[in-house]
């Protein structure tokens, strides 16, 4: 079997940041996949599951209701719990989506109230939420994004 692209990235040198991880084309359509690395893989603790779940709910709600909602294909957590995937239509670079990701972070940091989609009828694990921890991880990630060096995969 071929090794998939995400397994070829050197996770020993990967930092927090916003990375264009792949682009796929089908005819005239390009889909860009971004890694939003909230923690440095294998060097920092992974995020707690309830915080990841809350970031997923709030991030997806923001992205699918915002000005660029027609470009959004998917937003969801990485299985390793070090970050999230943002999949969008378009031939995009990290710099193209950085403002959107920062706006999403601000939305999460300023959010108060009931988590969207966190009811038994709407979610398969609706009680597994933690807004304060979601804000904690999001604040650290947002601060890391301010640095230009975190916009691309480091050179091996």
Image: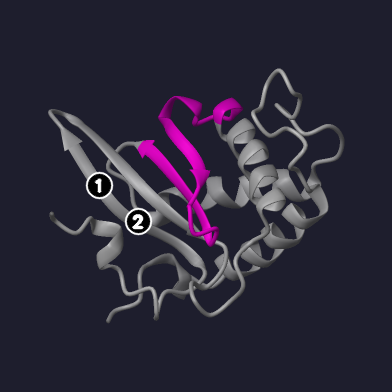
Q: Residue furthest toward the top? A: 121
Which quadrant is the N terminus positioned in? bottom left
Q: Position of residue 115 (x, y in %)?
A: 77, 34
Please name the residue shown 35% across and 76% down the image.
154
Q: Which mark is residue 23?
A: 1
**In the image: residue 88, left or right of residue 121:** left
Magenta span contains residue 86: yes
Which residue lies under the disc numbered 2? 20
Q: Position of residue 76 (x, y in %)?
A: 51, 42
**Around disc 2, counting alpha carbons within 10 Å, would you say few (fewer than 14), some (14 to 19), or many (20 or more)?**
many
Secondary structure beneath label 2: strand
Please name the residue shown 52% across and 73% down the image.
40
Tell me whether circle 1 and circle 2 mark residues in contact (CB < 8 Å). yes
Q: Position of residue 58 (x, y in %)?
A: 67, 38
Which quadrant is the C terminus positioned in? bottom left
- The correct choice, above or below, for 133 with respect to 144 in the image is above
**In the image: residue 19, left or right of residue 91:** right
Magenta stretch bounds: 64-88
**Around disc 1, counting alpha carbons within 10 Å, would you say few (fewer than 14), some (14 to 19), or many (20 or more)?**
some
Q: Observer-nearest residue: 2 or 25? A: 2
Q: Position of residue 29 (x, y in %)?
A: 21, 30
């Amino acid at each position: 079997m071929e090794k998939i692209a995400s397994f070829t990235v050197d996770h020993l040198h990967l930092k927090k940041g916003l990375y264009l991880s792949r682009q796929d084309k089908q005819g005239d359509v390009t889909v860009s996949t971004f890694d939003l690395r909230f923690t440095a893989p294998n060097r920092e603790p992974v995020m707690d599951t309830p915080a990841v779940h809350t970031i997923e709910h709030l991030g997806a709600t923001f992205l699918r209701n915002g000005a660029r909602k027609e470009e959004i294909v998917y937003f969801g957590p990485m299985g390793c719990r070090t970050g999230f995937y943002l999949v969008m239509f378009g031939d995009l670079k990290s710099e193209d989506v950085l403002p959107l990701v920062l706006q999403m972070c601000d939305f999460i940091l300023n959010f108060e109230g009931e988590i969207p989609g966190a009811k038994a009828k709407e979610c398969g694990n609706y009680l597994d939420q933690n807004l304060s921890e979601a804000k904690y991880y999001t604040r650290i990630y947002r601060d890391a994004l301010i640095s230009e060096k975190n916009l691309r995969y480091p050179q091996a």
